[in-house]
Image (cartoon, rainbow, N blue to C red):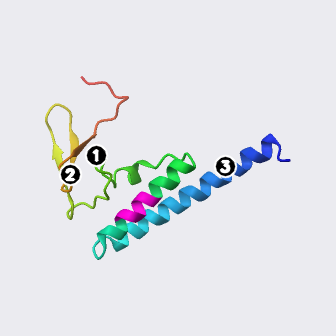
Amino acid sequence: MVNRRMRHRLRRENKRIALERIFVLFNMAKEVFREEPELAQYYITLAKKIGMRYKVKLPIELRRMSCKHCKSFIFPGINCRVRLQQRREPHVVITCFNCGGFMRIPLRNRGIPRR
C-alpha cells in the first residue's frame, strides 16, 4: 500500500516527466512544420492531451505557439502575422491565417500604474 507521501512524490515525478515530453513534442513540431504541417499539428495535439491528462499548465512560451481559437500550431511568418499596436495600451497582435482569429498580448506590466 502506497502512503500519502509516496503518492505525492509519484504525482510530482509524473508531472515533471509530462512537462519534458511536452517540450520535446513542441520542439519536434517546430522542426517538422515546414515539410509536414499535419504531423506538427498532431504533435501539438498530443502535447496538449498529455498536459490535460497530468494537469500540467503549459508554459507561456508554448501556449503562444498555438491558436486559442482553432488550436492549430502557429509559426510566425508562415501561418500567422505578428504586429505591434500602440493604440490605448501597447500590445502585440498575433493573427492566425487558418481561422482569422487574433490574440492580443499586452506589453505593459500589470503591476505598474499609469501616470
Return the residue at label 2: 99
How far apart are the two marked residues, 3 and 1, measured between alpha carbons?
Answer: 31 Å
Return the residue at label 1: 69
Magenta segment:
41-46
In terms of secondary structure, what is the magenta stretch mainly?
helix
> Horizontal placement of 74 versus 18: left or right?
left
Query: Do the numbered discs 1 and 2 sit on residues whose CB atoms are within 8 Å?
Result: yes
Q: Amino acid at mark 1?
A: His
Q: Secondary structure at mark 2?
A: loop
| Location of residue 4 by image quarter | top right
> Horizontal placement of 75 versus 13: left or right?
left
Q: Amino acid at mark 2?
A: Cys
How far apart are the two marked residues, 2 and 3, measured between alpha carbons?
Answer: 37 Å
Quadrant location, the C terminus: top left
Q: Which mark is residue 12?
A: 3
Q: Amino acid at mark 3?
A: Arg
